[in-house]
Image (cartoon, grey):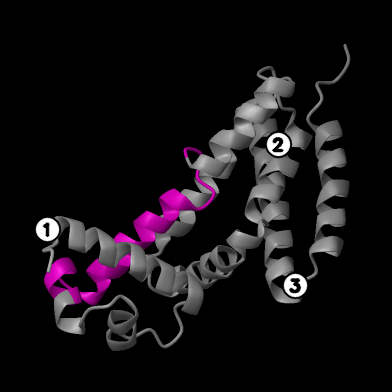
Amino acid sequence: MKRVAPGARRGQILQAAAQYLLAHGLADLTLRPMAAACGTSARLLIYHFGSKDGLLRAAAELLRERIGTAGGPAAQATLAAQTAQGAPTPGSLVLAIWREATRPDSRYALMLSFDALTRSMRTPEPWRRFTVGLHAAWRMRLDGVLPRALSAARRRQLLTLAMATLEGLLLELVRSDDLRRTSAALALFAREFERLCRLPRT
């Protein structure tokens, strides 16, 4: 039987634990069923990660890097396509972020992100960094396409508006499972956001 190095085994367990979280969420989360799904035991989970919180922190970091971050594969592919077609505008980037976040394979990630957000309000660790990381990545990308000549105050207003609208419509999507209606609302916002981001004529 081929032996697996401890570091490699830890990585395999972490990947499986992250998938378990995506599939089952955080409600009533206990180590024993997670360990069984990972092909190991609760004792070995503690051995590899020190504690349940240690495992959750590691899994949260892995998922944060994977889901919707500025450096993730989906984000890079989208930005490359946009660059090939011309520089993205604020409205087109809002639409691109929405398409990334609402892919069929991102649905469980959306549910987990809102679950984590709710829990981070009461117990910051380990989920605060996960939720803040996703928010910051989208905000950074949007900030990068706003006109440089906008004042700092105006930029903050526009970014706050865009992030609140994106996150609100994503929450409505998770609640209602109505992609057509929420996408239509987001498209309407993207058009208005494009208009709001234009510099005033002098």
Q: Which residue is drawn at 58% across and 70% down?
A: 111
**Sequence-first disc among 2 and 3:** 2
Q: Give the range drawn in magenta.
A: 45-71
Residue under label 3, please give it: 177
Q: Which residue lies furthest to the top in this view?
A: 202
Q: Up-down: is 178 above or below 183?
A: below
Residue under label 1, please give it: 5
Residue 63 in percent (x, y) is at: 42, 57
Q: Is mark 2 on a helix, strand or loop?
A: helix
Find the distance from the CA under tag 2 to the CA under tag 1: 43 Å
Residue 130 in percent (x, y) is at: 43, 57
Q: Is mark 1 on a helix, strand or loop?
A: loop
Residue 125 visible: no
Residue 91 in percent (x, y) is at: 78, 36
Q: Which residue is drawn at 13% across and 64% down?
A: 2
Residue under label 2, please give it: 93
Find the distance from the CA under tag 3 to the CA under tag 1: 42 Å
